[in-house]
Image (cartoon, helix red, strand yellow):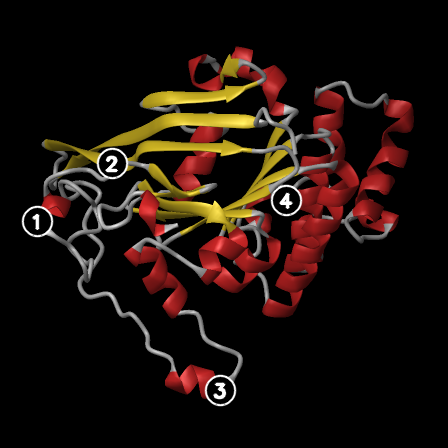
Amino acid sequence: MNVEPLLKVENLVKHFHVRLGAFGERTATVHALDDVSLDIQHGETLSLVGESGCGKSTTGFTILNLHRASGGRVIYKGQDLTLLDDKHMRPFRRDLQIVFQDPYSTLNPRMTVGEAIGEPMLFHKLAAKTELNDKIAALLQDVGLPSRFASRYPHELSGGQRQRVVIARALACQPKFIVCDEAISALDVSIQAQIINLLLDLQEKYGLTYLFIAHDLAVVRHISTRVGVMYLGRLAELAPRDALFEAPLHPYTKALLSAVPEADPVRERNRKRQILEGDVPSPLNPPTGCRFHTRCPIAADICAKVVPEWKAARPGHLVACHAVNSSSA
């Protein structure tokens, strides 16, 4: 693994301004992301997990400059992507791709599979028209589809087949980094396993780096190199996969992992679950201090007043919690 990360995210902030009231007479700010920092290493799969609305997808979109950052930096090849407009961002689009959750809405229903995959290659001048069909066929083969599918339309394919086409289209640009935004959530469980294995095979073949956004912790454990846990727009914990699943430090992480069912029925019956009380606060008015303190079972007075420091509690294991310090190692 390279010492220098492929992509560096520093204090990333994304706020959305919305109008409230029947006639939009009031304005408010949605704190989607606040002070998110992480490095993404070459060839790894960094997964982001957390409850709905915690900022996972917004992180991916803001890294790719699909959402304009409100603050912070995203460094790729020495360039801060947050400073680039659409024109100057275009050369980086080849390297930075995304696979969305719903493959049907991602694909143009009026374009054949071959046209959808070939379009980015022609746009970025990665293939001449004379060799385009051969490259489309090779990409279809890479994602486990026969070359004859090039003449089909999206409505003629199953959900899993459509997602394979979307992955092939992302690969057409010869990317270095792919954001997988809930890329398997809309698929049947049996198809999910196939797509996960496909992503792993493609990562090994092409040296890809993934930001994998998901709810399913069992899938995350299978595919990840490292895992980040998000809560209400902030990172709560970031650690190597095994360290996080076997010895989590943050109370929120412990609660998430306790909700994952055990395969052994005896262990499932006997284990103690950590059930969180209350609802997730609104990002329109997030709590002061630690954002998790309103639901935390070990919250102290300081938690409501002071934002916890983002610190290394163990080598490579970062956490934001007043109850955890470096002596926890």
Q: Gap in Å between the C-alphas at discs 2 and 1?
A: 23 Å
Residue ID for mark 2: 31
Quick one: 278 or 19, which is closer to the camera? 278
Q: Gap in Å between the C-alphas at discs 1 and 3?
A: 39 Å
Q: Gap in Å between the C-alphas at discs 1 and 4?
A: 55 Å
Q: Answer yes or no: do the residues labelled 2 and 3 have beta carbons within 8 Å?
A: no
Closer to the eye: label 3 or 4? 3
- The residue at the point 19 percent across, 47 percent down is 282
Q: Earlier in the sequence, mark 2 or mark 4?
A: 2
Residue ID for mark 3: 265
Residue ID for mark 4: 109
Q: Does residue 151 appear left or right of residue 39 in this picture? A: right
Labelled disc at residue 301:
1
Q: Earlier in the sequence, mark 2 or mark 1?
A: 2
Label 2 element class:
strand
Q: Does residue 181 appear left or right of residue 175 in this picture? A: left
- Quadrant location, the N terminus: top right
Closer to the eye: label 1 or 4? 1
Label 4 element class:
loop
Label 3 element class:
helix
Q: Answer yes or no: do the residues labelled 2 and 4 have beta carbons within 8 Å?
A: no
- Amino acid beneath label 2: His
